[in-house]
Image (cartoon, rainbow, N blue to C red):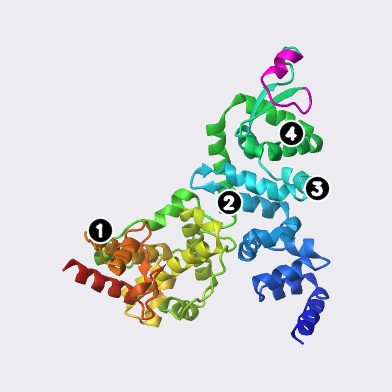
Amino acid sequence: MKQDTLQKSAEAFHSLPLAEKRSYLRQRGAKEKLNLIISDSEGKRLTASLEPQEFFWLMKEVGENDAVELLQLASAEQCVFILDMELWEGWTFSQERACHWLAHFMEGGEPRIHELLKHLDFEFLQLFLSRELVVGGGIGDQSNDEERLADYDHTFDGVFMLTFKNPKHSQLIGSFVSMLIKLDNELYTALMEGIKGDVDVEMEEQCLRFRSGRLEDLGFPPLEEAVSIYARVNPDNFEVHGDKQLAPAGEGGQLVPILPREETLLFRALALADSPTLLQELNYLVNSALVAEGTAVKEPESMVGILDRVCGYLNIALESLTGGDEGRAAILLTGEPLKRLFQLGFSIVLELQFTAREIESADYASGKLISGLKAKRPRYYRGLDSDGVDGYREFKDLADVERTAEMLKHLHS
């Protein structure tokens, strides 16, 4: 009976207009959403209608292994977003991750690569290939064939001589270069000539600037701005300015869906304020935290953890400033930049870290508590919760702070 119901539901979905399909998908879980998309006759159009961030989140939720068919339906813009999110750790380009994703995209064959080449920056391709190839020969080279071929692994065209720097990537890179020659010989020639110039460091900086520009257009701040949300303020001297601008600091779609995960003062105040602009500002703050962490976007659990941290720090700040008054909290959210409130919540938790640095303990539970607080981003030890689970989570309210502070006071005495 359940299977019949699911079948009828799928059939009804496939008969809907595209816009209604999009609305329906927003209400479904990741696995069901994936199955509906890949089984739909308009699967490619339907996939392309997803915002790049929405597509990326769906892919992460179902997992790369289960998203193979979905990736084949992805638009070039969605693929570029994947590369922008996956290939950078702070200011550093990850060649290993680049090869990993190139292998995925090449499963779509020449049509996929041909479309992707139209959207990838020349500088990105040059940076990527320069880390895999040593190039010799070239147009106008005067060496004879014997000299030109002597110290190189391979030539695809008798003009450029190639040596593969990384044997484990040689088959992948060789297949890609072979496609590149066939699909866009002019681009191939320009890339080979460029790689001979060896300007890797400058190219990496330029690629990062282009990537930052694309992400800014989608509501993600540059790394320098993103890390500034973790600037410390003095909780004892914090003053409410009430000087928020009418427009939020950034615009764009959200990567992690922001839904009430617990009944907290923050979400009650957000509901009371009922402001789309405020939600947009919250989205930008979450995006800032994701950019600041860098590697957090590799796994959905990590991204949700960042969301929990942002909401937790905001909630701690609101509880500290309003004593739990929802009306005052709603007014505070609409008048005070969320970034400042986040910094206050973070700084309140950071005070616990400063105290923990002065304490050592051989006791298992106490050691876990202290270790979590000494992490780069302090974590709450779940052993202090009523269920006594041995693990960590993000701080979510002032009760967490007070409980931890009391334990530290006991250990310090």
Bounds of the magenta segment: 145-158
Residue shown at 57% from the left, 64% from the top: 254
Secondary structure state at the residue bearing disc 4 = helix
Q: Could you tell me which quadrant the N terminus lies in?
A: bottom right
Task: Identify the residue under disc 4.
Answer: 187
Q: Amino acid at mark 1?
A: Arg
Secondary structure state at the residue bearing disc 1 = loop
Alpha-carbon neighbours of circle 4 within 10 Å: few (<14), some, or many (≥20)?
A: some
Say which label, 4 or 2, has the lower sequence index: 2
Q: CA distance from mark 4 to mark 1?
A: 56 Å
- On the question of residue 393 being in view, the answer is no
Name above or below for residue 395 compared with residue 325: above
Q: Where residue 260 sits in the image (x, y, percent)? A: 51, 76
Say which label, 3 or 2, has the lower sequence index: 2
Task: Work out whether residue 408 or residue 387 is closer to the camera in this orientation and state it.
Answer: 387
- On the question of residue 167 being in view, the answer is yes
Say which label, 3 or 4, has the lower sequence index: 3
Task: Identify the residue under disc 3.
Answer: 111
Task: Identify the residue under disc 2.
Answer: 86
User: Is label 4 or label 1 in front?
Assistant: 1
